[in-house]
Image (tube, rainbow, N blue to C red):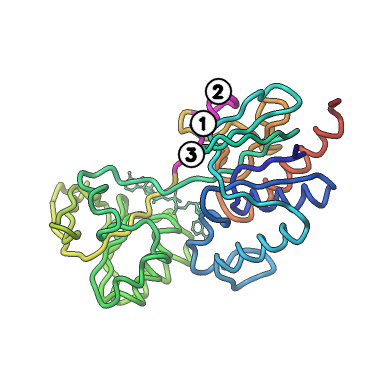
Amino acid sequence: MYDILIIGAGPAGMTAAIYGQRGGKKTIVFDKLSYGGQVINTAEVANYPGIPNMTGLDFADKTYNQMKDLGAEMSYEEIFEIRDADKPIKTVITTSGKEYQCKAIIIATGSSPRPLGVENEDRFRGAGISYCATCDGAFFRDKTVAVCGGGNTALEDAEVLSDIAEKVYLVHRRDEFRADATNVKRVKSKKNVELVLDSVVTAIKGERFIQGIEVENKKTGEKRELKIDGLFVAIGQMPENDIFKDVVKLNKAGYVEASEDCLTGTDGIFAAGDCRAKKVRQITTAVSDGAIAALAAIEHINKTEY
Ligand code: NAP
C-alpha cells in the first residue's frame, strides 16, 4: 500500500515524489523505460531559474537522485489501468498484471512527439527520421538534414544540428516562429541553416533510408525537393492519456482537464505537468505542478478516513 502513486517520471512526477516524501507520505513513481521525460532530449536547459547552464540529462539525474535520497521508490513498469478510481483506496494495474494499491494518484505522463502524418513516415523512423536531435544528431555528421517545426524544440534542434551537419534546412509552415526570440536569433546567425518558410512537408522519399523530402510553399503552391540524409520532426507534442479516459475528464486534444490546482474532478486523482490542459509547457511549469499536485494529494490523504 502506497500513499501516493505517481504515473510518469518527468520533471512533474519526480517533483511530486520529492514533495510527497518530504510530506511524510510513502511514494512510488512509475515510468515505462527511464526517468527524466522529455527533458533528457534537451541539450541545454538555459531558462531554469538559479541554474543557468545544465544539460537536460543532468537536470533529470539530479532530480532523480534527490527523490531517491528522500526515499521515493521508482518502478519501471507500464501502467495499464486504474481501478476503484472513485474509492478511497485505488488500485493501479501494470501491463504485466501486477497490482498496486494507493490512497492518491498523480497522473504526470507528459506528452510525446507529434508525428507529421505524411506517407512513409513510419517506414523511415530510425532510417533517417528522428524525433530527437540530441539523441540522434551525431549520426548526421557532415550530412544534410532538415528540421520541421517552428517552436523552441525545432529551433534548438536546428542550432544543435548546425554544429554537426554540413547543411540544415528548417522547414516551418508559417513565416513567423513560435520559438523564443533568442533561439530564433541564434539559428538565423548560423550560415549553414536555410529557412524554408510558409512550407510543409508533402512527401518523404527514399529506398532503405530517407533520401529527400518534397516541401510545398503554402502561399505560392510551389513544390521543391530537398535532398536530405535525415529529417528531424519537431512539430509539438501529443498527450498519452487514453488509459485514463474513464477515470478523469480529457479535453478534445486528449489532455487531462485539471486547472492550476491540479485537481481532476475525481477525488484523490491529480494531474501534473504537460499531460494536463494548459497553455505553457515548460520545465518550470511542470515542477510547479508537481509540487501543487503532491501537496493536494497530501491534504486529500490527511482528511480522508481509511
Ligand atoms: P510547440 O511550441 O507546440 O511548437 C510546435 C511547432 O510545430 C509550431 O511552430 C507549429 O506551427 C508546428 N506544427 C504543429 N503542427 C504541425 C504540423 N502538423 N505540420 C507542420 N508544423 C506543425 O512545440 P515544441 O517546440 O515541441 O515545444 C513544446 C513546449 O516545450 C513549448 O511550450 C516550448 O516552449 C517548450 N520548450 C521550451 C524549450 C526552452 O524553453 N528551452 C525548449 C523546448 C521546448 P505554428 O507555430 O504555425 O503553430
**Callout 1 crowding tier (Cα within 10 Å): few <14, some 14–19, many ≥20:** few
Q: Residue at x 34, y 76 (%)?
A: 164
Question: Mostly what secondary structure, the magenta segment?
Answer: loop
Q: What amino acid is labelled 3 in the image?
A: Glu
Q: Which mark is residue 143?
A: none
Q: Position of residue 94 (x, y in %)?
A: 56, 37
From the viewer's perspective, is 186 left or right of 264?
left
Label 2, label 3: how many angstroms apart (C-alpha)?
A: 14 Å
Q: What amino acid is labelled 1 in the image?
A: Ile
Q: What amino acid is labelled 2 in the image?
A: Asp
Q: Which mark is residue 240?
A: 3
Instruction: Say which quarter of the image contains residue 129.
Output: bottom left
Magenta residues, start to end: 238-251
Tag 3 or tag 2, which sits nearer the N-term? 3
Residue beneath disc 1 = 243
Q: Position of residue 45 (x, y in %)?
A: 56, 66
From the viewer's perspective, is 191 left or right of 43?
left
Instruction: Say which quarter of the image contains residue 59.
Output: bottom right
Instruction: Say which quarter of the image contains residue 11.
Output: bottom right
Label 1, label 3: how many angstroms apart (C-alpha)?
A: 8 Å
Q: Nearer the viewer, residue 143 or 47?
A: 143
**Callout 3 crowding tier (Cα within 10 Å): few <14, some 14–19, many ≥20:** some
